[in-house]
Amino acid sequence: MKYPILYSFRRCPYAMRARMTLSYSGIIYEHREILLKNRPKDLYDISQKGTVPVLRIKESNILDESLDIMKWALKTSDDDNWYKEDITNQDTFISGNDNNFKSKLDKYKYHIRNPELSFEEHRINVIEFLKKYDYILKTQKYLINDKISLADIAIFPFIRQCANVDLLWFKPSFPNLDKWLENFKNSNLFKTIMTKFPIWEKENNKIIINKSA
């Protein structure tokens, strides 16, 4: 294999943040878009979890956690110091998102499947995180300081998901967080990684990302 291979799904927030970091770091890789309802055997061959993203760096070097992919990319290139300052603070933010907020977000987003609480009660459970972020962003541009960090990129796709449940409620309720969200949504970095690709099949031509023409 000439380049690392990324198995991805366009709308998966974990895959989004991995693709954003790979793009930022200028990593050249082969993109394989899959359908979660029809996952290819090749994916299970290298990661029994069968989840995305999975990055095959070399034949025997497999990363199947998005955060590991992001940190690997930043070790390769991190010109704007996304993960060189306030690392402990960043890790705390990311852990809170991945281990706590995400589960509450899923229940809020799919509240019909989780009738143990009302929609309003599920919303209350995500509000505590949104309020915290909104308060922080009242006095600085990004979550850690006035520069983009890994924490911003790691958390952004999940805030995007949360906002999309009810944008009419989200926008006026969390104006600072909404401004931060819109900044990322309208960025070239995000727009670039949201390109639609055909579903990967072995017969397809390879899709190489970040390679100069």
Image (cartoon, grey):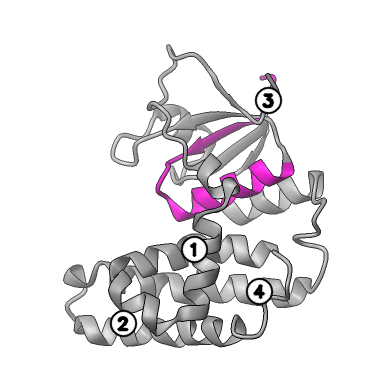
Spatial CA distance of label 4 from label 3 is 31 Å
Magenta region includes residue 19: yes
Q: Which residue is mark 4?
A: 141
Q: Which residue is mark 3?
A: 211
Q: Nearer the viewer, mark 4 or mark 3?
A: 4
Question: Left of 43 or right of it: where is 88?
Answer: right
What secondary structure is found at the residue carrying circle 4?
loop
Q: Choose top left, top right, bottom left or bottom right for residue 33.
A: top left
Q: Tag 3: Cα neighbours inside 10 Å, few (<14), some, or many (≥20)?
A: few
Q: Position of residue 153 (x, y in %)?
A: 60, 60
Tell me what residue is drawn at x 62 percent, y 66 percent: 152
Q: Which residue is mark 1?
A: 182
Question: Looking at the rendered structure, which numbered label has been put on residue 123?
Answer: 2
Q: Nearer the viewer, mark 2 or mark 1?
A: 1
**Residues at discs 3 and 2 in contact (Cβ within 8 Å):** no
**Depth order, front residue of 136/71:** 136
Spatial CA distance of label 2 from label 1 is 21 Å
Whether residue 99 is visible here, answered yes or no, is: no
Amino acid under label 4?
Lys
Q: Tag 4: Cα neighbours inside 10 Å, few (<14), some, or many (≥20)?
A: some
Q: Position of residue 207 (x, y in %)?
A: 54, 22
Q: Nearer the viewer, mark 1 or mark 3?
A: 1
Give the mark, 1 or 4, whose residue is nearer the N terminus: 4
Give the residues in magenta. Answer: 1-25
Amino acid under label 3?
Lys
